[in-house]
Amino acid sequence: MEKIDDTLSLYFHTYFENMLAIREIDHVPEEIIFLNPDLSHQDSDYFQSLGIIIMENSMAISFNIFDNLYPLCISVVLGMKSIEKLSENEKITLNMASKILLCLNGEINTAFTIRKRLVDENFLQDLSEEMHFVEIICLKFKKSSIAWAYKFYLVQKIIAKSTEKELFKLFDKEISFLESHLIKHPRNYYAWSHRLLVLKDLLMKLNKENQLVLLEKELKGIKKYCEKNIHEYSAFHYLQFLTKKLRDENCIDINEEKAWILQLILIYEECYETNQGKYDKNERTVSELFSLKKHMKYLEQF
Protein backbone atom coordinates (compact mmCIF):
# COMPACT_ATOMS: atom_id res chain seq x y z
CA MET A 1 0.00 0.00 0.00
CA GLU A 2 2.87 2.34 0.75
CA LYS A 3 4.28 1.90 -2.76
CA ILE A 4 0.84 2.61 -4.24
CA ASP A 5 0.49 5.75 -2.12
CA ASP A 6 3.93 6.99 -3.19
CA THR A 7 3.18 6.51 -6.89
CA LEU A 8 -0.24 8.13 -6.68
CA SER A 9 1.14 11.00 -4.63
CA LEU A 10 3.88 11.65 -7.17
CA TYR A 11 1.47 11.88 -10.11
CA PHE A 12 -1.29 13.60 -8.19
CA HIS A 13 0.80 16.42 -6.72
CA THR A 14 2.75 16.89 -9.97
CA TYR A 15 -0.20 17.08 -12.34
CA PHE A 16 -3.69 16.47 -10.92
CA GLU A 17 -3.97 18.24 -7.58
CA ASN A 18 -4.99 21.59 -9.02
CA MET A 19 -6.19 21.46 -12.62
CA LEU A 20 -7.69 24.94 -12.88
CA ALA A 21 -5.13 25.94 -15.51
CA ILE A 22 -5.93 22.86 -17.64
CA ARG A 23 -8.49 23.26 -20.40
CA GLU A 24 -8.36 19.83 -22.00
CA ILE A 25 -6.81 16.37 -21.74
CA ASP A 26 -5.49 14.29 -24.60
CA HIS A 27 -4.15 10.74 -24.73
CA VAL A 28 -1.15 10.62 -27.05
CA PRO A 29 1.54 8.23 -28.33
CA GLU A 30 4.73 8.18 -26.30
CA GLU A 31 6.65 9.87 -29.13
CA ILE A 32 4.70 13.08 -28.53
CA ILE A 33 6.17 13.21 -25.04
CA PHE A 34 9.73 12.21 -25.93
CA LEU A 35 10.12 14.25 -29.09
CA ASN A 36 8.52 17.47 -27.85
CA PRO A 37 10.93 20.29 -28.77
CA ASP A 38 9.41 22.75 -26.31
CA LEU A 39 10.62 20.92 -23.22
CA SER A 40 13.88 22.18 -21.81
CA HIS A 41 16.75 19.69 -21.65
CA GLN A 42 16.84 20.00 -17.89
CA ASP A 43 13.16 19.14 -17.44
CA SER A 44 12.70 16.69 -20.28
CA ASP A 45 14.08 13.58 -18.56
CA TYR A 46 11.82 14.12 -15.57
CA PHE A 47 8.69 14.72 -17.62
CA GLN A 48 9.45 11.89 -20.03
CA SER A 49 9.84 9.40 -17.21
CA LEU A 50 6.38 10.30 -15.88
CA GLY A 51 4.79 10.18 -19.32
CA ILE A 52 2.76 13.40 -18.98
CA ILE A 53 3.40 16.93 -20.18
CA ILE A 54 1.38 20.13 -19.84
CA MET A 55 1.61 22.72 -22.59
CA GLU A 56 -0.64 25.66 -23.46
CA ASN A 57 -3.25 24.62 -20.89
CA SER A 58 -3.47 21.11 -22.28
CA MET A 59 -2.42 17.89 -20.55
CA ALA A 60 -0.98 15.18 -22.80
CA ILE A 61 -0.97 11.72 -21.23
CA SER A 62 1.14 9.03 -22.88
CA PHE A 63 -0.58 5.75 -23.72
CA ASN A 64 2.36 3.93 -22.15
CA ILE A 65 1.60 5.03 -18.60
CA PHE A 66 -1.82 3.36 -18.77
CA ASP A 67 -0.20 -0.04 -18.26
CA ASN A 68 0.94 0.88 -14.76
CA LEU A 69 -1.17 3.81 -13.61
CA TYR A 70 -4.59 2.54 -14.70
CA PRO A 71 -4.56 -0.81 -12.82
CA LEU A 72 -3.04 0.95 -9.82
CA CYS A 73 -5.90 3.44 -9.62
CA ILE A 74 -8.52 0.76 -10.30
CA SER A 75 -7.23 -1.37 -7.45
CA VAL A 76 -7.57 1.55 -5.03
CA VAL A 77 -10.99 2.65 -6.27
CA LEU A 78 -12.52 -0.84 -6.25
CA GLY A 79 -10.85 -1.76 -2.98
CA MET A 80 -12.52 0.95 -0.88
CA LYS A 81 -16.29 0.59 -1.03
CA SER A 82 -17.43 1.96 2.35
CA ILE A 83 -16.15 5.54 2.37
CA GLU A 84 -17.95 6.40 5.62
CA LYS A 85 -15.62 4.09 7.54
CA LEU A 86 -12.40 5.32 5.96
CA SER A 87 -9.67 7.17 7.77
CA GLU A 88 -8.54 10.63 6.61
CA ASN A 89 -5.44 9.16 4.94
CA GLU A 90 -7.56 6.60 3.10
CA LYS A 91 -9.84 9.37 1.80
CA ILE A 92 -6.77 11.24 0.58
CA THR A 93 -5.62 8.15 -1.31
CA LEU A 94 -9.10 7.58 -2.72
CA ASN A 95 -9.31 11.19 -3.91
CA MET A 96 -5.98 10.88 -5.71
CA ALA A 97 -6.81 7.53 -7.32
CA SER A 98 -10.32 8.45 -8.48
CA LYS A 99 -9.24 11.77 -9.99
CA ILE A 100 -6.30 10.29 -11.90
CA LEU A 101 -8.41 7.33 -13.02
CA LEU A 102 -11.12 9.56 -14.51
CA CYS A 103 -8.52 11.43 -16.52
CA LEU A 104 -7.59 8.06 -18.03
CA ASN A 105 -11.15 6.77 -18.41
CA GLY A 106 -14.05 9.12 -17.80
CA GLU A 107 -16.66 6.38 -17.76
CA ILE A 108 -15.84 4.62 -14.48
CA ASN A 109 -19.05 4.80 -12.48
CA THR A 110 -17.43 3.76 -9.19
CA ALA A 111 -14.91 6.59 -9.41
CA PHE A 112 -17.68 9.17 -9.81
CA THR A 113 -19.66 7.59 -6.97
CA ILE A 114 -16.60 7.90 -4.75
CA ARG A 115 -16.11 11.55 -5.62
CA LYS A 116 -19.78 12.21 -4.95
CA ARG A 117 -19.40 10.66 -1.53
CA LEU A 118 -16.28 12.72 -0.89
CA VAL A 119 -18.30 15.85 -1.68
CA ASP A 120 -21.14 14.72 0.58
CA GLU A 121 -18.62 14.08 3.36
CA ASN A 122 -17.25 17.64 2.85
CA PHE A 123 -13.84 16.18 2.05
CA LEU A 124 -13.98 17.94 -1.33
CA GLN A 125 -15.12 21.43 -0.38
CA ASP A 126 -14.08 23.52 -3.40
CA LEU A 127 -17.03 22.83 -5.70
CA SER A 128 -15.82 25.33 -8.29
CA GLU A 129 -12.57 23.44 -8.70
CA GLU A 130 -14.43 20.12 -8.83
CA MET A 131 -16.80 21.58 -11.42
CA HIS A 132 -13.86 22.61 -13.58
CA PHE A 133 -12.40 19.13 -13.27
CA VAL A 134 -15.57 17.37 -14.44
CA GLU A 135 -15.89 19.83 -17.34
CA ILE A 136 -12.48 18.65 -18.54
CA ILE A 137 -13.73 15.08 -18.31
CA CYS A 138 -16.91 15.96 -20.24
CA LEU A 139 -14.80 17.50 -22.99
CA LYS A 140 -12.57 14.43 -23.26
CA PHE A 141 -15.32 11.84 -22.85
CA LYS A 142 -18.20 13.69 -24.49
CA LYS A 143 -20.71 10.82 -24.27
CA SER A 144 -19.99 9.75 -20.71
CA SER A 145 -23.48 9.86 -19.22
CA ILE A 146 -22.11 9.42 -15.71
CA ALA A 147 -19.73 12.37 -16.14
CA TRP A 148 -22.66 14.59 -17.16
CA ALA A 149 -24.74 13.22 -14.28
CA TYR A 150 -21.94 14.08 -11.84
CA LYS A 151 -21.70 17.57 -13.30
CA PHE A 152 -25.42 18.10 -12.76
CA TYR A 153 -25.08 16.81 -9.20
CA LEU A 154 -22.44 19.49 -8.56
CA VAL A 155 -24.66 22.15 -10.15
CA GLN A 156 -27.48 21.18 -7.79
CA LYS A 157 -25.11 21.46 -4.83
CA ILE A 158 -24.10 24.97 -5.89
CA ILE A 159 -27.69 26.00 -6.64
CA ALA A 160 -28.75 25.02 -3.13
CA LYS A 161 -26.29 27.55 -1.67
CA SER A 162 -26.86 30.38 -4.15
CA THR A 163 -28.93 33.57 -4.10
CA GLU A 164 -31.12 34.44 -7.09
CA LYS A 165 -28.46 36.84 -8.36
CA GLU A 166 -25.83 34.13 -8.07
CA LEU A 167 -28.09 31.69 -9.91
CA PHE A 168 -28.00 33.88 -13.03
CA LYS A 169 -24.19 33.96 -12.87
CA LEU A 170 -24.09 30.20 -12.45
CA PHE A 171 -26.35 29.69 -15.47
CA ASP A 172 -24.19 32.03 -17.55
CA LYS A 173 -21.13 29.95 -16.65
CA GLU A 174 -22.92 26.76 -17.60
CA ILE A 175 -24.02 28.21 -20.93
CA SER A 176 -20.49 29.44 -21.65
CA PHE A 177 -19.10 25.96 -21.07
CA LEU A 178 -21.82 24.25 -23.10
CA GLU A 179 -21.38 26.60 -26.04
CA SER A 180 -17.63 26.00 -26.11
CA HIS A 181 -18.28 22.27 -25.75
CA LEU A 182 -20.64 22.24 -28.75
CA ILE A 183 -18.07 24.00 -30.89
CA LYS A 184 -15.74 21.06 -30.32
CA HIS A 185 -18.46 18.37 -30.18
CA PRO A 186 -21.49 19.48 -32.25
CA ARG A 187 -24.84 17.72 -31.84
CA ASN A 188 -24.05 16.29 -28.41
CA TYR A 189 -27.31 15.05 -26.89
CA TYR A 190 -25.77 14.93 -23.39
CA ALA A 191 -24.77 18.60 -23.48
CA TRP A 192 -28.28 19.68 -24.49
CA SER A 193 -29.90 17.39 -21.92
CA HIS A 194 -27.67 18.93 -19.25
CA ARG A 195 -28.70 22.43 -20.32
CA LEU A 196 -32.37 21.52 -20.02
CA LEU A 197 -31.92 19.88 -16.61
CA VAL A 198 -30.06 22.92 -15.26
CA LEU A 199 -32.70 25.30 -16.64
CA LYS A 200 -35.56 23.30 -15.07
CA ASP A 201 -33.78 23.21 -11.72
CA LEU A 202 -33.10 26.95 -11.81
CA LEU A 203 -36.70 27.78 -12.69
CA MET A 204 -37.85 26.10 -9.48
CA LYS A 205 -35.57 28.41 -7.46
CA LEU A 206 -36.49 31.71 -9.15
CA ASN A 207 -39.48 33.94 -8.60
CA LYS A 208 -41.97 34.36 -11.46
CA GLU A 209 -40.44 37.57 -12.79
CA ASN A 210 -36.93 36.14 -12.94
CA GLN A 211 -38.25 32.94 -14.47
CA LEU A 212 -39.65 34.90 -17.40
CA VAL A 213 -36.46 36.94 -17.75
CA LEU A 214 -34.41 33.77 -18.00
CA LEU A 215 -36.81 32.02 -20.39
CA GLU A 216 -37.04 35.00 -22.74
CA LYS A 217 -33.28 35.42 -22.77
CA GLU A 218 -32.84 31.72 -23.56
CA LEU A 219 -35.47 31.81 -26.29
CA LYS A 220 -33.74 34.69 -28.04
CA GLY A 221 -30.34 33.03 -27.88
CA ILE A 222 -31.51 29.57 -28.93
CA LYS A 223 -33.40 30.90 -31.94
CA LYS A 224 -30.20 32.55 -33.16
CA TYR A 225 -28.36 29.28 -32.62
CA CYS A 226 -31.00 27.28 -34.50
CA GLU A 227 -30.85 29.65 -37.45
CA LYS A 228 -27.20 28.68 -37.97
CA ASN A 229 -27.44 25.03 -36.88
CA ILE A 230 -30.53 23.59 -38.51
CA HIS A 231 -29.33 19.98 -38.07
CA GLU A 232 -29.04 20.29 -34.28
CA TYR A 233 -32.29 18.54 -33.42
CA SER A 234 -31.58 18.68 -29.68
CA ALA A 235 -31.47 22.47 -29.95
CA PHE A 236 -34.94 22.50 -31.50
CA HIS A 237 -36.21 20.19 -28.77
CA TYR A 238 -34.85 22.66 -26.21
CA LEU A 239 -36.51 25.48 -28.16
CA GLN A 240 -39.84 23.66 -27.96
CA PHE A 241 -39.56 23.48 -24.17
CA LEU A 242 -38.92 27.24 -24.01
CA THR A 243 -41.77 27.96 -26.42
CA LYS A 244 -44.28 25.96 -24.39
CA LYS A 245 -43.22 27.50 -21.07
CA LEU A 246 -43.57 31.03 -22.44
CA ARG A 247 -46.79 30.20 -24.27
CA ASP A 248 -48.29 28.89 -21.02
CA GLU A 249 -47.49 32.27 -19.47
CA ASN A 250 -48.97 34.14 -22.47
CA CYS A 251 -45.55 35.70 -23.10
CA ILE A 252 -45.10 34.54 -26.66
CA ASP A 253 -46.96 35.00 -29.95
CA ILE A 254 -47.20 31.60 -31.64
CA ASN A 255 -48.01 33.23 -34.99
CA GLU A 256 -44.72 35.14 -34.81
CA GLU A 257 -42.91 31.89 -34.06
CA LYS A 258 -44.57 30.23 -37.05
CA ALA A 259 -43.58 33.14 -39.29
CA TRP A 260 -39.99 32.86 -38.04
CA ILE A 261 -39.65 29.13 -38.74
CA LEU A 262 -41.43 29.44 -42.11
CA GLN A 263 -39.02 32.18 -43.16
CA LEU A 264 -36.12 29.97 -42.09
CA ILE A 265 -37.47 27.05 -44.12
CA LEU A 266 -37.85 29.23 -47.21
CA ILE A 267 -34.30 30.57 -46.86
CA TYR A 268 -32.79 27.09 -46.66
CA GLU A 269 -35.04 25.72 -49.41
CA GLU A 270 -33.73 28.45 -51.69
CA CYS A 271 -30.14 27.63 -50.72
CA TYR A 272 -30.62 23.95 -51.55
CA GLU A 273 -32.45 24.72 -54.80
CA THR A 274 -29.52 26.86 -55.89
CA ASN A 275 -26.91 24.26 -54.97
CA GLN A 276 -28.73 20.97 -55.67
CA GLY A 277 -31.47 21.60 -58.20
CA LYS A 278 -35.22 21.48 -57.74
CA TYR A 279 -36.04 21.07 -54.07
CA ASP A 280 -39.23 18.99 -54.17
CA LYS A 281 -37.49 16.25 -56.15
CA ASN A 282 -34.48 16.03 -53.91
CA GLU A 283 -35.09 13.58 -51.05
CA ARG A 284 -31.77 14.42 -49.44
CA THR A 285 -32.73 18.08 -49.19
CA VAL A 286 -36.02 17.17 -47.51
CA SER A 287 -34.10 15.26 -44.84
CA GLU A 288 -31.73 18.19 -44.42
CA LEU A 289 -34.70 20.35 -43.36
CA PHE A 290 -36.13 17.74 -40.98
CA SER A 291 -35.60 19.76 -37.79
CA LEU A 292 -37.20 22.86 -39.29
CA LYS A 293 -40.23 20.94 -40.58
CA LYS A 294 -40.57 19.12 -37.27
CA HIS A 295 -40.55 22.38 -35.35
CA MET A 296 -43.21 23.83 -37.64
CA LYS A 297 -45.45 20.82 -36.92
CA TYR A 298 -44.87 21.35 -33.23
CA LEU A 299 -46.02 24.98 -33.47
CA GLU A 300 -49.08 24.03 -35.51
CA GLN A 301 -50.54 22.08 -32.58
CA PHE A 302 -51.22 25.33 -30.69
Image: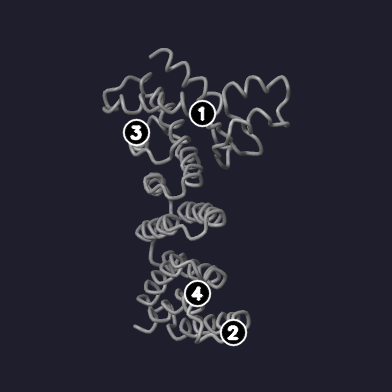
Q: Residue 128 placed where, x, y %?
A: 48, 41
Determine whether label 2 and label 4 are within 8 Å by CB.
no
**Distance CA(mark 3)–CA(mark 2):** 57 Å
Q: Secondary structure at mark 1?
A: loop
Residue 189 picture location, percent across and down: 42, 58
* Circle number at residue 288: 4
Residue behind mark 1: 17
Tell me the distance, in whole angstroms, between the alpha carbons under discs 1 and 4.
46 Å
Residue drawn 32% across the image and 19% down it? 87
Instruction: Say if 228 sits above or below 129 in the image.
Output: below
Which tag, 1 or 4, sits closer to the chain's start?
1
Residue, disc 2: 277
Q: Earlier in the sequence, mark 4 or mark 3?
A: 3
Quadrant including the N terminus: top left
Q: How many residues crowd around disc 2 within 10 Å: few (fewer than 14), some, or many (20 or more)?
A: few
Q: CA distance from mark 4 to mark 3?
A: 44 Å
The nearer-to-camera label among 1 and 4 is 4
Q: Counting other residues with Cα less than 10 Å from the Cα at mark 3, is it few (<14), some (14-19), or many (20 or more)? A: many
